[in-house]
Image (cartoon, rainbow, N blue to C red):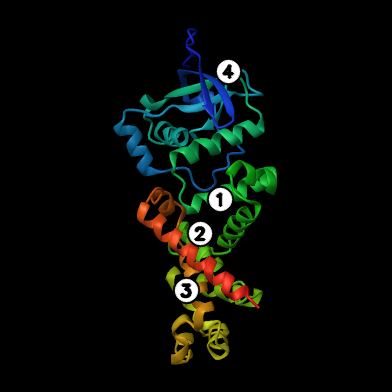
Amino acid sequence: MIQPTDQKNWQERRLGRTILRTHRDTLDIDDILPNTSQPRMGPKEDPELQRQIEANEGVFEPVLVEPHPDLAGKYRIIDGDRRWTNSRVLVDSQKKNQFRTIPSEITDRTLTDDERIRVWVYIHRQRKEWDAKEKEMVAYSLVDLLGRASAANILGITVSALDKLVEIYELSEKLGDLREPGSSITWAREIKNLNKKLVTPTVLDSIVKKINERKITNSKDIRQLRRILRDHVAKEEFLSESGEIQSALEKVPADANKPQGLSEEVAALVDAIKRQPWTALDRLKGDSELLRNIEEAERVFEALKKQLMQK
């Protein structure tokens, strides 16, 4: 068993509104335990991460741990569960004991539940490593742990934005027979971007059923339902037992293939903007040309709104 050293060089670390007092050390893998209330969901074993750990001759970035509240001499993970899990695979399954030693950043106290979650969310937002899939999973997990208001506050979003993320995750859980299981969030996002007035419970059930039966095999094909569901004949074809996207499109009148007037044009633009993934928007921060275009769009929409509101 590896014992923490007695000489501790404590340092203060500010993570959002939480200030931690920590020191660096090495711990034996058996002295570190996972956090059972980890907001990150889904599989944690990752062959690529295992290869990285081997290539770096160990975990490169220390895991953040706290004294375990119930087990003396043990530590609970605040952040670094995947690094610990994949080191565990190398040690237990592949018998590579050189990876037993885990570099760790150890807090001087056990955090409160609220502090622990806030610290974890802050770290992952700073790393900008969340993709669209994980954001929905974390939102769902936080609501389950803390409730809607606290979850929205911790994530720094509105309750309505949080609700949408949760709805997407819950819908993704109904899509259980995809060729790529990890793509369920992408499918769910496409469905949720459809006009709510068009997607009745019956329509939603049919979409989910046809996806699970692999009658719809490309998530981008969901966008075709904007045209299909607006036409009664095409909609009925799609909802039929044998109906598919292509057979329903063949029922759409030729003159329905183009947006119908200004309202449809605006709706199409809004949908296109909503489809942009969070990670893509993050990369566009500070883009001067895009900001100029948005400012011009704001002026156009404001003038249009005033014109339409005049009696």
Q: Which residue is mark 4?
A: 108
Question: x%, y% of residue 46?
Answer: 41, 43
Q: Nearer the viewer, residue 301 or 12?
A: 301
Label number found at residue 137: 1
Instruction: State which tag comes first along the sequence, 4 or 1.
Output: 4
Question: Do tag 1 and tag 2 residues touch (Cβ < 8 Å)?
Answer: yes
Mark 4 crowd level (few <14, some 14–19, many ≥20, 10 Å Cα)? some
Callout 2, which amino acid? Ile
Question: Which residue is drawn at the image coordinates 50% and 49% (left, top)?
Answer: 134
Q: Which residue is mark 3?
A: 223
Mark 1 crowd level (few <14, some 14–19, many ≥20, 10 Å Cα)? many
Callout 4, which amino acid? Asp
Label number found at residue 185: 2
Instruction: State which tag comes first along the sequence, 4 or 2.
Output: 4
Question: x%, y% of residue 101?
Answer: 42, 23
Would you say residue 89 is visible in this rendering?
yes
Would you say residue 205 is visible in this rendering?
no
Q: Nearer the viewer, residue 132 or 243?
A: 132
Question: Do tag 1 and tag 3 residues touch (Cβ < 8 Å)?
Answer: no
User: Separation of disc 4 and disc 2 at Cα?
Assistant: 38 Å
Mark 3 crowd level (few <14, some 14–19, many ≥20, 10 Å Cα)? some
User: Separation of disc 1 and disc 2 at Cα?
Assistant: 9 Å
